[in-house]
Image (cartoon, rainbow, N blue to C red):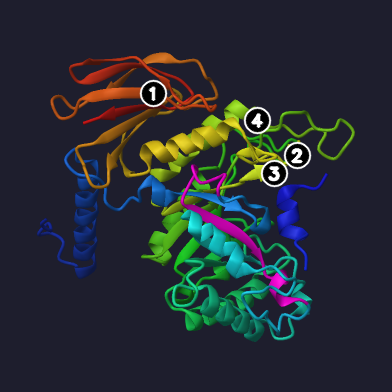
Amino acid sequence: MTNLKSLIRNALVAVGALPSLLCNARLQMLALTLCIVASSDAAADSPDRPARSFPTMHEFIGLNVHTVQFKPDLYKPICRRLRDYHPIAWDLQPDPAHPSAFPLAANGVDWGGLYGSWLRVGYDIDACLIFDDVPPTLWKDPQHDAQVYGEAFARFFGPSGKKLVSSIEVGNEPSKYNESQYRAIFQGMAAGIRKGDPKLMIATCAVLIGKPDEWSKPMSAVAGLESLYDVLNVHSYAFKDGWPTWHRSFPEDASIPYLKQVEAVIRWRDEHAAGKRVWLTEFGYDSASKPPAPDGPWAKWVGMTDAEQARYIVRSYLLFSAMDLNRAYLYFFNDKDEAQLHGASGITRNFAPKPSFYAVAHLDKSLGEYRFSRALVRRDGDLYCFEYVHADRPQERVMVAWVPTGDTKAKLKNLPLAAGSVKPYRAERMPQDRGGPATVTWKAVEDHVEIEVGGEPVFLWMH
């Protein structure tokens, strides 16, 4: 059966004071910078104020979807942000030099009606413009034709037009385009978007630090083009092994590059493109209810259980929320229970909620108005405990704790508590079904809280 991600990629048819010794001006500036950074870090860790630079979870949590297949009302409990795989082949048939007369795509899809129905439910839309299914040779004048399309798209869809999308990604994982070909398309399309609607945010395709792979472009593909983008886009999956198993591990596993490659893009941004945002637009876990076909190409594929998918997705969101990321979009919204790579990544299975659906909905409901404040405990193999602070009422906080391993057994743990500053009043464990979260017993003892913590995150509310 067809792999959902391959379908989307390949078969879419028809996004203080300075020390006196520092007399050198550059050293003085460096010292001043370090003082400012240290001051900012101290403020972020202060129990008296939230880290304002972090987004709320409502602003942070996103979901990858695909055009006419998406059911906006069903996924309303999950998030406010959607990332749509928008195939530009639908708009450019048969010639990239002649874009569609929006709102209609060349194949008849009414983008105004489609995206409008999502907006009415309350979503914010990021349009990821996919062009892998448009052969590079089909572009007669790639940079010019991409610019014409970008301008037309921005004028119609952007905040100054029909207000249908708030951001555009120039490509997803354009594996069929080499670096120079992608750079030409990006330059043209981004310039057209800037001209068509300067209010639209522009994101690159998936980029990667180090050795490029099939799915991400090296930073050199966009280096020097900082005026044409607002966001660097990164994809990351928790692979423990590649082909033929594609086995994924728990998110905190230090032996995999899952978190490290996201942090690497953030560091590159800090050094080379300060002020730009970084979005994680793909991450996720496969969980099928059946084994792969024993005699097919996926015979050795290894998936997660539904319960593992749920807790690893929620823990991933928590881990990413502590990074200098503005958004994280989960792959995927729905699957057809295909036991193969990216074929079982949905939080629904044939549009029936999986445990991950309830777990992410609980995360959004519980922390939607809160933002990451600080990591109270971060001991690999033992305990993670993050603090989240309400965006408008900083005295209201939530501690979220979990054991950062593949084990699920709950153990009695001590969570740090600043004496006299806040008092816990409610605790519950991440749910995995429509029955909702289970309450958890706890005991406040002077400077800590005694509570059972396992692989499923525990939420402890305080005021």
Magenta stretch bounds: 73-93
Mark closer to the observer (1, 2): 1
Dot placed on the residue nearer the N-terminal end, 2 or 4:
4
- The residue under the point 65% across, 59% down is 67
Disc 1 is placed on an element classified as strand
- Residue at the disc numbered 1: 428
Q: Residue at x 72, y 42 (%)?
A: 343
Q: Quadrant of the C terminus?
A: top left
Q: Would you call the spot at circle 3 few (<14 residues within 10 Å), some (14-19), or many (20 or more)?
A: many
Residue at image coords 77%, 65%: 13
Q: Residue at x 49, y 23 (%)?
A: 455
Kind of residue at badge 4: Met
Q: Amino acid at mark 2?
A: Gln
Spot occupied by residue 268 in the image (x, y as percentages of width and height): 45, 59
x and y, in percent, of residue 106 in the image: 73, 75
Residue 208 visible to the viewer? no
In the displayed structure image, the side of residue 60 where residue 444 appears, left or right: left
Q: Which structural element holds mark 4?
A: loop
- Left or right, 460 with reference to 309: left
Q: Earlier in the sequence, mark 4 or mark 3?
A: 4
> Which residue lies under the disc numbered 2?
340
Mark 1–mark 4 contact, CB under 8 Å? Answer: no
Marks 2 and 3, how far apart in space?
6 Å
Helix, strand or loop for disc 2? loop
The residues tagged by marks 4 and 3 sit, at their Cα atoms, a distance apart of 12 Å
Drawn side of residue 42 relative to residue 298, left or right: left
Q: Tell me the amino acid under the disc marked 3.
A: His
The quarter of the displayed image where residue 442 is located: top left
- Image mark count: 4
